[in-house]
Image: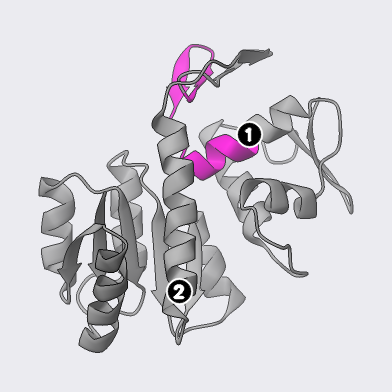
Amino acid sequence: MNILVLDDEKEIADLVELYLKNEGYNIYKYYDSNEAIKCINEQKIDCAILDVMIRNVDGFEICKLIRDKGLNFPIIMLTAKIDDKDKIQGLTLGADDYITKPFNPLELIARVKSALRRYIKYNEKSDDKIIYINGLEINQDKHICKLYDNVINLTPMEFDILLYLAEKRGNVVSSEELFEKVWKEKYLENNNTVMVHIRRIREKLGENTKKPNFIKTVWGVGYKIE
């Protein structure tokens, strides 16, 4: 597995590299964003750990660049900022996870492993089913989502959310349940992560936010696909 690490704080980048190498990962480490972008364009990357506040091209811009290229590998943002609006911005651009500095390296390793498990599952072939919902086709076997025969480019996290809602079709799923089933972590109050990912899925499906065709919001309760 190839992991890109970008942080202009040399001590942090070196520490992350050390812990990841100890887990057997191949690391592409950079202190400069332009060099990291060159690596993304030239190498096969399976996960990216990006510092938000980095010189030249910041982590948000690189995250957007990765997703605009149609690359779906997991992205974990590192930041010293703790404002919800910054976290929401990163998630809206397609980041999968967010870790605030200073952090426990063992927690970062756990987050990386979790993200990679989801990514591997997303790209593996399994003996599962295809779900059809009014022009929406979710192929669990190939991990492909289509809308009216057009492939929808979802990240593994977005695919898992949509699949879970589709499997629970007709039932309301709370943000807490979605978070704990998809992220497999304890849900904390005032967590906007689910809301941001739902928004991105709706955008990719071309949904009218006021009258969505697929993912309905049940105010104060959660989400459902009818």
Give the mark, 1 or 2, whose residue is nearer the N terminus: 2
* Residue 141 seen in the figure: yes
Residue for badge 1: 162
Name the quadrant containing residue 14. bottom left
Q: Could you classify mark 2 by the number of other residues whose Cα lies within 10 Å: few (under 14), some (14-19), or many (20 or more)?
A: few
* Foreground pick, 105 / 36: 105
Q: Position of residue 117 (x, y in %)?
A: 46, 45
Q: Which of 99 and 126 is in front in this view?
A: 126
**Where does the image place residue 39, in percent across and percent down from the top left?**
13, 55
Disc sitting over residue 45 in the figure: none
Percent across and percent down for residue 27 are 20, 62
Report the front residue among 88 and 175.
175
Q: Kindly state the secondary structure of the residue where label 2 is placed.
A: helix
Q: In which quarter of the image is residue 84?
A: bottom right
Camera sees residue 214 = no
Residue 108 vs 194, above or below: the answer is below
SS type, badge 1: helix
Residue nearest the viewer, comparing 8 with 206:
8
Q: Is 152 included in the stretch rendered in magenta?
A: yes
Residue at the (37%, 65%) spot, across then down = 60
**In the image, 125: left or right of 131?**
left
Please state, as top left, top right, bottom left or bottom right, where the C terminus lies in the image. top right
The residue at 56%/65% (across/down) is 88
- 135 left or right of 9 in image: right
**Residue 196 vs residue 156: left or right?**
right
Spatial separation of the CA atoms under disc 1 and disc 2 = 30 Å
Residue 124, magenta (yes or no): no
Magenta segment range?
A: 143-161
Q: Are marks 1 and 2 in contact (CB under 8 Å)?
A: no
Which dot, 1 or 2, sits closer to the camera? Answer: 2
Q: Which residue is the site of mark 2?
A: 106
> Mark 1: which amino acid?
Leu
